Amino acid sequence: KNEVEQSPQNLTAQEGEFITINCSYSVGISALHWLQQHPGGGIVSLFMLSSGKKKHGRLIATINIQEKHSSLHITASHPRDSAVYICAVSVYTGGFKTIFGAGTRLFVKA
Amino acid sequence: DSGVTQTPKHLITATGQRVTLRCSPRSGDLSVYWYQQSLDQGLQFLIQYYNGEERAKGNILERFSAQQFPDLHSELNLSSLELGDSALYFCASSVGTGDGYTFGSGTRLTVV
């Protein structure tokens, strides 16, 4: 079993829909990251969370430390949101090792 | 432009060769992280440096080595290259250790 699990693997949505991507992890973490990777390959860091909830524009990220679970929500989805969304956790080992989920491929249809 | 510069953007080389990938972190960032993204393995953490010192090590092969120089740029050296080393190699930087990351645009390595 992977230490970081994401669901779903693939998601197709209609423009305007509310989208949720889930991430569960099984290790002790210092922080959780949500990343966005566009088809060109570049990676953008969306959020870094260690507790609670963060919001940026139409994106909301939440984390429940006790349940070892995080969600990324996209409100009023748009075709430009089409990308791979990756959950990653930072694990302290003297420095910070990163463990990645396999990613969720999102396609938003116009 | 994220502020993290990786060179070269593309590299094609033959099996058995050695290459060096370079990363300049965002101004003010002291930590540099290296990652490998291959089609079959996804993103994998390789190594972290903080202010010139190695701080964390992931799934980095013995044929690979890295270092961070006094001006904080970092180099990832890949030697005795195999076809399976073909991948995107990303560098990221952060202010300290455990802060949010800023990613470079990556180096696409193709081993033929």
Image (tube, rainbow, N blue to C red):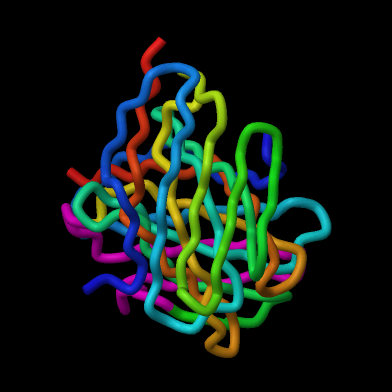
The residue at 42%/32% (across/down) is A83
Question: Between A12 and A38, which is closer to the camera in this rendering?
Answer: A12
Total count of labels: 0
To which quarter of the image does residue A64 belong?
bottom right
Specify the farthest residue to the bottom.
Answer: A94
Is A106 covered by the magenta stretch? no
Question: Between A99 and A52, which is closer to the camera in this rendering?
Answer: A52
Q: Point out residue A60 in the picture as x, y percentages from the top left corner.
A: 61, 45
The residue at 55%/59% (across/down) is A33
To which quarter of the image does residue A5 belong?
bottom left
Q: Point out residue A9 in the picture as x, y percentages from the top left corner.
A: 27, 45
Question: Between B17 and A57, which is closer to the camera in this rendering?
Answer: A57
Task: Give the position of the C terminus of chain A as an image quadrant.
Answer: top left
Residue A38 drawn above or below residue B71: above
The residue at 31%/79% (across/down) is B62
Task: Give the position of the N terminus of chain A as an image quadrant.
Answer: bottom left
Q: Which residues are magenta?
A: B58-84
The residue at 43%/36% (across/down) is A41
Tell me: A43 left or right of B28: left
Q: Point out residue B73 in the picture as x, y percentages from the top left corner.
A: 67, 60
